[in-house]
Amino acid sequence: MLVERSNNQEGNLATEVFVAGSDLRAKIRNPWGVFGLSIITLGIYTIFWWYYVNRELRDLGQAKRVSGLGDNPWLSTAAYIAGGFLFYIPTIWTIVTTTRRIQAAHRVTQQAEILNGWLAALVWIFTLGFGGPVFTQYQMNRLWNDQSVAQPVLSGASAGDGSGVISEQEPEVDKAQVLPGDSDQKGTL
């Protein structure tokens, strides 16, 4: 089932989708939500976000059985973090390689427009790094816009068919388990 939607469906910060018809998942995130959460958390969210961007690219490569979309998202994240301690060289390197992976992913998913690496560099440089995650997330969203939406998993649901939908009989069964002998207890305290 393909669903047409905007990047920010119904005001949510993220919509989960399946990666290339597999059981792997990616998120269509609001690019400005990434910016806002990065500011609010003083950059901590950006570290987690960077890991997930690289993990989603790796998952796309695995689902499509192509190389060049990354193998180790932890290494990219470590480089992103370590850059502050090593004259930003690892950070710049991981930004460049992730941008190249997004370009490769656009080719793999047959996007009409491939990410322009020079434009990405200008955004990262002239916004002092603040606009980079917004631009990168926008480009990632382009990858996932034609993927099918993943249905939310209901925790604690006990449908027998595994669908997560509660049948009409289940509340009665649950009630009988919680209140055994309910008819015998009426009127007595």
Image: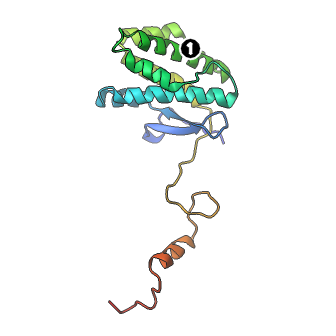
Position in image of residue 172 (x %, y %) = 52, 76
Instruction: For mark 1, give the secondary structure.
Output: helix
| Residue at the right extreme, as displayed | 65
Position in image of residue 53 (x %, y %) = 50, 27
Position in image of residue 112 (x %, y %) = 64, 18
Quarter holding the N terminus is: top right
With respect to residue 159, does 65 lie above or below? above
Residue 158 relative to residue 79: left or right? right
Q: Estimate how packed mark 1 is, as few (under 14), some (14 to 19) or many (20 or more) residues with alpha carbons within 10 Å.
A: some
Q: Residue at x 70, y 27 (%)?
A: 65
Q: Residue at x 47, y 32 (%)?
A: 29
With respect to residue 156, does 140 lie above or below? above
Position in image of residue 138 (x %, y %) = 49, 24
With respect to residue 137, does 179 lie above or below? below
- Residue 166 falls in which quadrant of the image? bottom right
Residue 64 relative to residue 83: left or right? right
Residue 143 relative to residue 126: left or right? right
Q: Residue at x 55, y 30 (%)?
A: 56
Q: Residue at x 59, y 63 (%)?
A: 159
Residue type, mark 1 in image: Arg
The count of marks equals 1
Task: Report which residue position mark 1 lands on.
Answer: 100
Q: How is the protein colored in the picture?
A: rainbow
Q: From this viewpoint, is residue 100 visible?
A: yes
Q: From this viewpoint, is residue 123 visible?
A: no
